[in-house]
Image: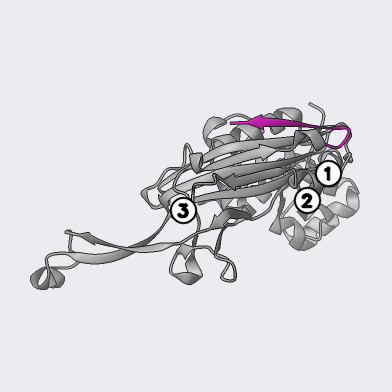
């Protein structure tokens, strides 16, 4: 299939109830927060992980939908597959020599990796083996980019004391009946993330297709459904708002489209505890010419 021909921007609203959406390992796994404003944060890396996990689950074993960045698989192992496919060594000096013999080797390896791995086709990747081997396409810039998610209102993380009756050691068992622990939760938070899909990069680099795009929307809408844990509480994507441009380069700046989307608390609500405490609106009357809006979820 051909690469997509239209530019897109999108806004995702998701919420958490009595869970930790994205703990910070440098702060004792406390929910990430902007210390100046109290707004909660979720990293782009966290959201991409959920998307990768969903795609891997629903497309398991299908050609062209493997995941490059995954647990337990060294990146160099996947890189070596491309070299083996074209019969070239991974050794730096030998790879340079092979490149001199075939001036299209960079593009061939890039195209092979993009064809094999959905997340490279989507988000791009830095493929360390190829960078060290002095190949130009060791770094691929993906057409889909996500920013950090930020809560609509300030959050109030709570540190909750928990107990367990299973004692760790025999020595401890002689001195105590329970062990104490702690976990962080956000009682409730509605988060907003914004993203971009570049048709220009899809055509020039990864070949990201319309079929890939539809899978991306599906993965975003369901990214928490196959990734449950007690630590994350109840999380759900509430709405995906997609802006489609009539052209590949776009018909309006992204910020103007994002400014059309508002999430506001109901007048009587002071402390939100449910999605129904908010109203999400899109000012479609002021959509720029050549841009259409679709609301999903």
Residue 273 is situated, as x and y percent measured from the top left of the image, at: 44, 48
Above-or-below relation of 100 to 59: below
Which residue was labeled with disc 3? Answer: 271
Q: Residue at x 52, y 35 (%)?
A: 57
Which residue was labeled with disc 1? Answer: 201
Find out whether the residues at labels 2 and 1 contact each other: C-beta distance under 8 Å.
Answer: yes
Above-or-below relation of 92 to 203: below
- Residue 260 on the magenta span: no
Residue at disc 3, secondary structure: loop
Q: Inspect this view and state whether residue 55 appears.
A: no
Query: Cα distance, mark 2 to mark 1?
Result: 7 Å
For marks 1 and 3, the one nearer the N-term is 1
Q: How many numbered circles are shown?
A: 3
Q: Residue furthest front?
A: 268
Query: Cα distance, mark 3 to mark 2?
Result: 41 Å
Binning the other alpha carbons within 10 Å of mark 1 as few (below 14), some (14 to 19) or many (20 upward) gives many
For marks 2 and 1, the one nearer the N-term is 2
75 or 139, which is in the foreground? 139
Residue at disc 2, secondary structure: strand
Query: Cα distance, mark 1 to mark 3?
Result: 42 Å
215 vs 182, left or right, is right
Looking at the rendered image, the quarter that the N terminus falls into is top right
192 vs 270, left or right, is right
Q: What residue span does the magenta drawing correspond to?
A: 287-297
112 or 28, which is in the foreground? 28
Residue 171 is situated, as x and y percent measured from the top left of the image, at: 13, 73
Q: Residue at x 62, y 40 (%)?
A: 280
Which residue was labeled with disc 2? Answer: 141
Closer to viewer: mark 3 or mark 2: 3
């Amino acid at each position: 299939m051909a690469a997509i021909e239209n530019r897109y921007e999108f806004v995702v609203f998701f919420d958490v109830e009595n869970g930790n959406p994205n703990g910070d390992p440098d702060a004792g796994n406390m929910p990430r927060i902007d210390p100046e404003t109290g707004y909660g944060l979720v990293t782009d890396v966290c959201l991409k992980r959920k998307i990768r996990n969903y795609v891997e689950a629903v497309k398991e074993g299908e050609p062209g939908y493997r995941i490059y960045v995954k647990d337990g698989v060294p990146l160099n192992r996947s890189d070596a597959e491309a070299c083996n496919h074209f019969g070239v060594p991974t050794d730096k000096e030998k790879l340079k020599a092979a490149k001199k013999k075939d001036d299209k080797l960079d593009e061939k390896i890039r195209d092979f990796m993009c064809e094999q791995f959905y997340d490279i086709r989507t988000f791009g990747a830095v493929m360390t083996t190829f960078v060290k081997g002095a190949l130009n396409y060791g770094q691929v810039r993906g057409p889909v980019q996500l920013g950090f998610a930020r809560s609509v209102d300030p959050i109030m993380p709570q540190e909750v004391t928990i107990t367990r009756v299973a004692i760790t050691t025999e020595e401890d068992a002689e001195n105590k009946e329970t062990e104490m622990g702690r976990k962080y939760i956000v009682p409730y938070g509605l988060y907003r993330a914004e993203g971009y899909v570049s048709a220009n990069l899809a055509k020039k680099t990864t070949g990201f297709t319309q079929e890939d795009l539809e899978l991306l929307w599906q993965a975003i809408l369901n990214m928490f459904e196959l990734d449950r844990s007690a630590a994350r509480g109840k999380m759900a994507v509430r709405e995906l708002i997609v802006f489609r441009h009539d052209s590949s380069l776009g018909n309006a700046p992204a910020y103007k489209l994002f400014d059309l989307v508002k999430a506001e608390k109901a007048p009587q609500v002071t402390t939100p505890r449910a999605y129904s405490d908010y109203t999400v609106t899109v000012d479609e009357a002021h959509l720029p010419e050549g841009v259409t809006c679709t609301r999903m979820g």
